[in-house]
Amino acid sequence: MPLGVVMKGIGGFYYIKSPSYGIVECKARGIFRKDDIIPLPGDKVSFSIVDTDKNTGLIEEILPRTSELVRPAVANVTQLVVVVAIKSPQPDFLLLDKMLITASIKDIKPVILINKIDKSTEEDVEKVKKAYENTGYKMFFLSAKTHEGFDELMDILKDKITVFAGQSGVGKSTILNRLAGSVLMETGEVSDKIERGRHTTRHAELFDLPNGGLVVDTPGFSSFELAGVELNDLELHYPEFENHLGRCRFNGCSHINEPDCVVKEAVVNGDIDNERYERFVHFYCMLKKQKDQRYRK
Ligand code: GDP
Ligand code: ZN
């Protein structure tokens, strides 16, 4: 049975992209509704062809999801590109770290995209680079205005399902429009669909790039509360802590007030960025407060 990826769903019809049949308009089998599962963009499905002339079909099965986002509602996202502007707006590093933690919890690979480099000085760029170089997260630099860095962005999107996120004003729409534009130019199609949909509530869609990458056409969360992380697991979502964990004097060290804490030593000698660490403390205290409140209730 042919396999494909759901690109979008509209009014009970799903548009499946499949290597051998192109875009197939499918309905879903009734059984999904009974199980309370509806196909989402990004779902891998098997389908049968109902009408070869009209290229219509029926979704037979939804394959297991590797991830599921709620806002936007997309399945199997493999990559989160967190967009940060080097200037205007000033980078919100608390939000950036929250997004990195969230991606880590959901097992989605995060990438940090620093936009608006046409506005930046060497010094601005170095500061950001330094803060995150020990995290191991891939970081790259772009100007959506001058298009510097777009080739590298294309490479990063290859063969993945990517959602863009980041605070308002950092350039997400500009980047998405340019990516979609390059697709439209290639197919010779003129469409204002993506632009039009940006500010209205509607379902997310995927669009495909010439290199096989799939991109969610609507930006993800721009701000949110840190949720779904256990207090004692917070440290696991800091890749630059990894080599130090388990070596503190106290078992279950929170790396905040305890003596002989290897994490704090690493902050002092510069192996861990001081501001990253301070934001860790901020999140830790916030989660602890939430936990204490839950117990008191
Ligand atoms: P969004 O809220 O993240 O979707 O941000 P937008 O795409 O709407 O961009 C916000 C503003 O920043 C717009 O005026 C864009 O033209 C501008 N902008 C986006 N990318 C760049 C860039 O690389 N350099 C400069 N100078 N301005 C940019
Ligand atoms: Zn410690």
Image (tube, rainbow, N blue to C red):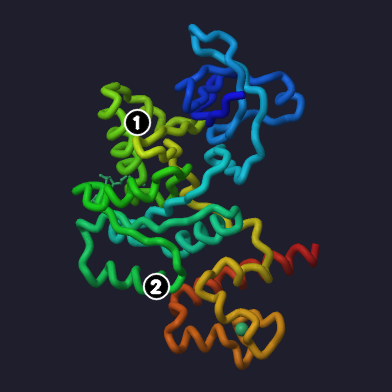
Image coordinates for residue 239, horizontal then vertical, percent: 52, 70
Camera-side mark, 2 or 1: 2
Image coordinates for residue 208, horizontal then vertical, percent: 40, 34
Q: Is mark 1 within 8 Å of ligand 1?
A: no
Circles 2 and 1, Cβ within 8 Å, touching? The answer is no
Q: Is residue 105 above or below residue 163?
A: below
Determine the image quadrant of residue 173.
top left
Q: Residue at left 47%, top 56%?
A: 110
Q: Residue at left 41%, top 40%?
A: 213
Q: Amino acid at mark 2?
A: Ala
Residue 195: assigned label: 1
Q: Amino acid at mark 1?
A: Glu
Image coordinates for residue 113, horizontal then vertical, percent: 36, 56
Quadrant where the image shows the N terminus: top right
Callout 2 environment at 10 Å: few (<14), some (14 to 19), or many (20+)? some
Q: Is residue 47 above or below residue 285?
A: above
Q: CA distance from mark 2 to mark 1?
A: 35 Å
Going by the picture, which residue comes out furthest to the bottom?
Answer: 260
Image coordinates for residue 267, horizontal then vertical, percent: 48, 84
Residue 131: assigned label: 2
Q: Is residue 196 above or below residue 109?
A: above
Indicate the quadrant of ligand 2 in the picture.
bottom right
Q: Residue at left 43%, top 73%?
A: 134
- Mark 1 lies on a secondary structure that is helix
Quadrant where the image shows the C terminus: bottom right
Callout 1 environment at 10 Å: few (<14), some (14 to 19), or many (20+)? some
